[in-house]
Amino acid sequence: MVIAVTGASGQLGQALKKVTQNHPKHEFHFFNSAQLDITQKASIEKAWKKIHPHFCINAAAYTAVDKAESEPELAYQVNADGVKNLAQICQQYQTVLIHISTDFVFDGQSDKPYPETHSTQPQGVYGASKLAGEQAISSICERYFIVRTSWLYSQFGHNFLKTMLRLAAEKPEVRVVNDQIGSPTHALDLAKALLKIISKPSANYGIYHYSNQGATSWFGFAQKIFEVYHLTTPLYPIPSSAYPTPAQRPAFSVMDTTKIKTEFQVEIPKWENALLKYKT
């Protein structure tokens, strides 16, 4: 099986590199943005002509949620136009596209986990650009899996875990919002789930949700990080109103993961267990 991975230098791309070491039977090709730019269709086609991938995991994305509000053209260029290019090439070469999307496609007003069928209503540029990418795929590709995830973190790249570790070392105290609820998801667990999709062929194409089990606030997540890493810096909860950001965050973004567990027999760890398991 030949598998192309875009966005290789990002958090998920690096997690996939680590996880794929346990899958020697597959031939993986990792591309960073310099090697394969999804905003340039010719760049994708050049790679596909060379390797003819059976699957493509698209981990390339514009993920700067706040900057997207002032850089909408760039966000759409990558998350919508680039994804459209990739979808067209995948359809042309009959490559199964596995695309990573986000909880930000929802409005955050629910009080129970979002199923894949729930109506989308992004509240900012980032979420809207990611939804546009989803729509491009579903209109172009016959064979695709869109996997929405949330609150991604790991030892790779920039993320909430690393921010907490840095702030605890640099600041006399740390304040974290306590009124946004979601499911922290370790990138290594998501990477394993994506490889499960590849290793267990299914014709039930469409949208799936994957996040670690359970839910908490950002403050609750921070509390657990402080506990696991034995951090002693004072930690305080604050409302979102005390920490205004350019982009509006969903107040509730917990997703229902029943579909992916049922279809691919994926065992999803609790978020607290994942944090402890992968402690660096």
Image: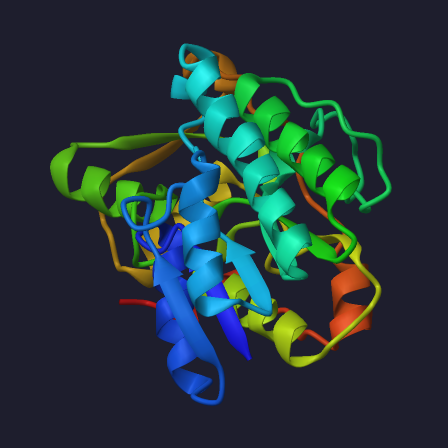
User: Which corner quadrant holds the N terminus?
Assistant: bottom right
Which residue occupies 67% across, 31% down?
Answer: 131
Q: Who is closer to the viewer here, 138 or 90?
A: 90
Quarter assignment of residue 263: bottom right
**Is residue 3 shown above or below 79?**
below
**Is residue 124 shown above or below 143?**
above
Percent across and percent down for residue 11 are 37, 52
Percent across and percent down for residue 65 are 45, 26
Q: Who is closer to the viewer here, 204 or 109?
A: 204
Relative to 112, 21 lies left or right: left
Which residue occupies 22% across, 37% down?
Answer: 167
Percent across and percent down for residue 177 are 46, 28
Which residue occupies 55% across, 29% down?
Answer: 81
From this viewpoint, which residue is outermost toward the bottom?
Answer: 25
Relative to 72, 182 lies left or right: right
For the question of whether residue 274 can be seen, the reply is no
Which residue occupies 80% across, 61% down?
Answer: 258
Q: Who is closer to the viewer here, 63 or 83?
A: 83
Relative to 202, 190 lies left or right: left
Relative to 193, 115 lies left or right: right
**Is residue 91 shown above or below 173?**
below
Percent across and percent down for residue 118 are 84, 37
